[in-house]
Image (tube, coloured by chain):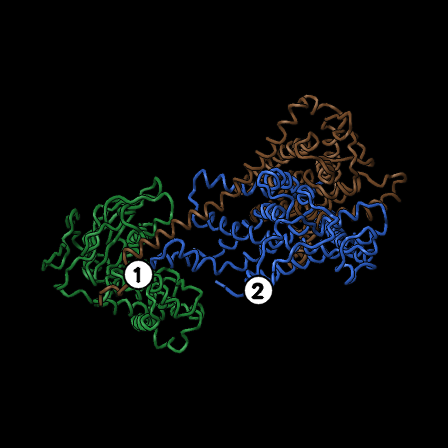
């Protein structure tokens, strides 16, 4: 019996043409969806640049980068971005001081020490830490952490960068831990076995063999953590205050780039005014900062994934 | 329309190497049973497909070099050879599976008769090819659907809608695959609930349901136990005279048991092609002889 | 501290090993301590919110509009707003995200265009959420003239969670074994037929999980919504999507101004009056509860689907 099945429409040449045409149409639609990601990036760049251009026609780049006061809403407006950048950097540094040690230690523990049972239950719980809405963390920073700190540091103002930074640090611990742990897991077992076979303890193996082997991934974790901390908005808007303040002292209140954008958006600025445009200029700076960190972080991630 | 009717039982191949007979076969032969197809005159010599100068590249690497071989209609042809010799690569040219991997390239032709279509030509649509040529894979891969739906899938894709008709064809395919009696009462069960051997027969039924002109088997029993293997070999033997079969196997005894013609390949080239009985008892090439006597794997 | 070299006696070796193992044990304790402290924070946070917000955690709170009087202010407009925004976000990000993932996983050739798309997806995952707000302000609110509406908010959040949906969908598509695809192709199916008949049906669990996790992230996002111009004193509800008469579904709510849960909480937290902070705590407890619930559901969905199909 060698006759082909009496085919109805889809099997005949005409049917096959239809199926193939349908395939092509579907592929086109899917490609458009995939291009949305590209369009979004392009749109972000276009919006930020076109809305800041008028701003930079009024404020010179030199002033923008070097002036030490940021008071766009005053009558005598000054547009130096340094106070905002300083605020961002200080809170980020405080956050890193918490997240990097804690995240790395947790990663080493989970990857090299923890028994299977503990790892499987703890990891999802840690992810939950990162799933908490940032506005809730802001509440926490303002109304729980700050009062606690005020007992330790008398005279600590109600708004300060220290509480905000600490809470941001706690918030990004899961992120730093999981990227670092991925990097450590990628180190092949035979390297560990070589170390154990020489009588090394777990701690020695972890610190002398695994961590160096996962270094680029751990560095990626740090850098991506920085990027997250820099972009954080609500915690600082709630707990660090909205007053631009050029200082390196974390116990003082200050505004970050992100908090400033929030503050302006809460108000009522006419579309097209220089105050309105200043948030795009600030956003541009923020975008550039995070872009640099992201690129560095992701290329390091690719490096450790390929190395093994 | 080209039909070769010659009464010699050794296929005449364009470009085949001359018989370099190695006299004095002092090495012991593995014992092989008497095989079907070893009848001196094979009456049906209709050619179903012919590879002409087939060369295949994975990127820059040449995996197949200038293969010339004829597959007889409704006969079983086995491809044997050591690992990496290109037999599976060659098999997958027939149904254009390589098209799913980027960077592959075909040169030469594989002609399908009676339409004389070049299967590997760029202008020929791979989907069309796969609608005429079926494949059974090394590891049984039924869909996680019911047994009925597994067999029906190929029919549905071809647009068959009448449920009655589909039911008939499914039953016919399952009978041909010697699986019907075992599953007729549980057609709605998942295909994955069957044993390994049954799953493979299900995959055979699935391929048979669409009445392929050529059925390709890629080491179909290497993942199965000996009993399941024996049943599938019986099945393949029964398919003779119904379907043209090309089977890749690394098990020489299987090739000897099941096939009418055998091709021995090595490093992407065709070394020898002959009636199975002749190739295993009296091979013309030293390389073939070395392989079948186990001098190298 | 002397190193133990060859020829050391058994006691020396034992002493050395115990000394080194102490570090091991210390580290384990430190690790556990830090981990549990971090988790403790989560617990303290939740408990604190519930405690502080307890006076206002009642049906009345959920059913009242915001008000200048703290005792009467509620989250009605906020949670309705959040629900409508989530509806929009899901309706946009799900088809676009799944379609993009299918393209990248099943169709995309290895060329520069594909590389650019993938780089962009990864990059967008790291863009701060407030930048999405600025994008939306310039593009959706003004350029597209959507105004400060639910539609703009929904679109913004869809873009924000798009990378999450894409990555989760790609992972679940990838988990379908290659053998199944090959079997389907070998039967003469076209690429779309293979995808629609075999790959997608078995990936629904992972896709659903990704969607839920994306939404749980979107629900807590405040910064982009503030930037677009969510107001927090909305004392009315948008028109309901469902009408009693034909055509039964209305879309006018998309154009209305909106508020959302995180916005409301932010507004209350920013007020010096401690009575409002109680409200903030209550709103926060509800918000956190919703987020944790969604994450729990996602984990459950993933677990259930993973059990059904074992290749």
Q: Report the number of discs.
A: 2
Q: Colour of chain A?
A: brown
Picture residue at 43% right of the left edge, 42% below the top: C110
Q: Quadrant of residue C293?
A: bottom right
- Chain to which the residue tagged by mark 2 belongs: C
The numbered dot on residue A9 is: 1
Residue for badge 2? C304
Question: Which residue lies most toward the right here?
Answer: A154
> Residue B126 location, x and y as percent?
31, 51
Question: Which residue lies most toward the left here?
Answer: B7
In-front residue for pair C136/B131: C136
Q: Quadrant of residue C283?
A: bottom right
Q: Can marks 1 and 2 be said to lie on one chain?
A: no
Q: Is residue C145 above or below residue B283?
A: above
> Residue C215 location, x and y as percent?
62, 53
Question: Left of A44 or right of it: where is C25?
Answer: right
Question: Left of C115 or right of it: where is A101?
Answer: right
Picture residue at 83% right of the left edge, 36% below the top: A251
Question: Left of A194 or right of it: where is B14?
Answer: left
> Residue A140 location, x and y as percent?
78, 48
- Figure chain in green: B
Dot in front, 1 or 2: 1
In-front residue for pair B147/C103: C103
């Amino acid at each position: 019996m060698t006759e082909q099945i009496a085919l109805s429409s889809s099997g005949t040449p005409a049917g096959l043409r239809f199926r193939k045409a349908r395939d092509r149409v579907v592929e086109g639609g899917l490609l458009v969806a995939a291009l949305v990601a590209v369009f979004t990036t392009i749109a972000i760049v276009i919006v930020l640049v076109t809305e800041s251009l008028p701003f930079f026609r009024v404020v010179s780049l030199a002033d923008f980068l070097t002036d030490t006061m940021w008071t766009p809403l005053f009558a005598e407006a000054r547009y130096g971005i340094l106070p905002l950048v300083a605020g961002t950097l200080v809170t980020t540094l405080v956050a890193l001081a918490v997240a990097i040690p804690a995240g790395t230690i947790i990663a080493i523990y989970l990857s090299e020490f923890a028994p299977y049972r503990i790892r499987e239950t703890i990891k999802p719980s840690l992810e939950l830490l990162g799933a908490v809405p940032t506005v809730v963390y802001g509440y926490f920073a303002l109304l729980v952490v700050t009062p606690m700190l005020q007992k330790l540091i008398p005279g600590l103002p109600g708004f300060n960068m220290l509480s905000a930074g600490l809470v941001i640090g706690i918030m990004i611990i899961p992120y730093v831990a999981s990227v670092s742990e991925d990097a450590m897991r990628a180190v092949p077992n035979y390297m560990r076995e070589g170390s154990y076979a020489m009588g090394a303890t777990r701690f020695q193996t972890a610190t002398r063999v695994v961590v160096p082997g996962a270094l680029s991934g751990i560095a990626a974790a740090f850098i991506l953590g920085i990027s997250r901390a820099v972009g954080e908005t609500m915690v600082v808007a709630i707990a660090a205050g909205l007053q631009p303040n050029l200082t390196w002292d974390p116990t003082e209140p200050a505004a970050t780039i992100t908090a400033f954008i929030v503050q302006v958006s809460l108000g009522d600025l006419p579309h097209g005014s220089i105050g309105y445009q200043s948030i795009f200029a600030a956003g541009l700076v923020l975008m550039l900062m995070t872009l640099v960190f992201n690129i560095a972080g992701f290329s390091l991630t690719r490096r450790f994934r390929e190395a093994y | 329309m080209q039909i070769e009717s010659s009464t010699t039982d050794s296929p005449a191949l364009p470009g085949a190497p001359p018989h370099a007979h190695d006299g004095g076969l002092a090495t012991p032969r593995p014992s092989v049973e008497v095989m079907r197809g070893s009848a001196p005159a094979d009456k049906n010599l209709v050619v179903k497909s012919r590879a002409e100068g087939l060369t295949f590249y994975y990127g820059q690497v040449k995996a197949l070099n200038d293969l010339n071989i004829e597959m007889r209609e409704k006969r079983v042809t086995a491809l044997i050879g050591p690992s990496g010799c290109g037999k599976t690569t060659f098999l997958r040219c027939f149904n254009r599976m390589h098209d799913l991997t980027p960077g592959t390239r075909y040169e030469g032709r594989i002609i399908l008769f009676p339409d004389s279509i070049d299967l590997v030509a760029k202008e020929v649509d791979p989907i069309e090819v796969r609608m005429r040529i079926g494949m059974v894979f090394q590891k049984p891969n039924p869909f996680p659907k019911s047994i009925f739906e597994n067999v029906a899938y190929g029919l549905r894709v071809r647009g068959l809608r009448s449920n009655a008709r589909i039911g008939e064809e499914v039953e016919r395919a399952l009978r041909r695959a010697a699986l019907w009696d075992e599953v007729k009462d549980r057609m709605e069960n998942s295909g994955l609930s069957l044993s390994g051997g049954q799953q493979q027969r299900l995959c055979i039924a699935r391929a048979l349901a669409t009445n392929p002109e050529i059925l390709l088997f890629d080491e179909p029993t290497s993942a199965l136990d000996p009993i399941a293997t024996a049943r599938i070999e019986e099945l393949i033997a029964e398919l003779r005279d119904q379907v043209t079969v090309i089977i890749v196997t690394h098990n020489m005894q299987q090739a000897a048991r099941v096939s009418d013609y055998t091709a021995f390949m090595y490093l992407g080239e065709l070394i020898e092609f002959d009636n199975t009985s002749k190739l295993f008892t009296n091979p013309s090439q030293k390389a073939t002889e070395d392989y079948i006597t186990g001098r190298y794997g | 501290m002397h190193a133990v070299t060859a020829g050391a006696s058994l006691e020396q070796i034992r002493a050395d090993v115990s000394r080194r193992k102490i570090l091991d044990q210390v580290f384990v304790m430190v690790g556990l301590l830090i981990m549990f402290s971090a988790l403790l924070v989560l617990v303290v946070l939740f408990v604190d919110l519930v405690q502080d917000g307890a006076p206002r955690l009642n049906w009345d709170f959920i059913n009242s509009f915001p008000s200048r009087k703290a005792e009467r202010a509620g989250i009605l407009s906020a949670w309705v707003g959040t629900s409508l925004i989530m509806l929009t976000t899901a309706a946009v990000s799900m088809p676009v995200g799944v379609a993009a993932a299918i393209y990248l996983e099943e169709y995309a050739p290895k060329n520069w265009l594909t590389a650019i798309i993938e780089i962009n997806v990864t990059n967008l995952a790291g863009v701060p959420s407030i930048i999405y707000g600025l994008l939306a302000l310039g593009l959706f609110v003004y350029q597209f003239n959507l105004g400060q509406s639910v539609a703009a908010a929904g679109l913004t959040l869809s873009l924000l969670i798009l990378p999450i949906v894409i990555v989760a969908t790609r992972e679940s598509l990838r988990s379908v074994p290659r053998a199944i695809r090959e079997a389907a192709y070998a039967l003469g199916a076209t690429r779309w037929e293979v995808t629609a008949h075999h790959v997608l049906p078995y990936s629904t669990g992972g896709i659903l999980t990704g969607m839920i996790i994306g939404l749980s992230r979107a629900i807590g996002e405040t910064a982009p919504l503030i930037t677009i111009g969510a107001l927090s004193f909305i004392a009315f509800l948008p028109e309901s999507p469902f009408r009693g008469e034909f055509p039964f579904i209305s879309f006018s709510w998309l154009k209305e101004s909106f508020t959302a849960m995180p916005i409301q909480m932010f507004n209350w937290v920013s007020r010096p009056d401690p009575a409002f902070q109680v409200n903030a705590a209550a709103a926060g407890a509800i918000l956190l509860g919703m987020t944790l619930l969604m994450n729990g559901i996602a984990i459950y969905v993933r677990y259930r689907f993973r059990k059904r199909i074992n290749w």
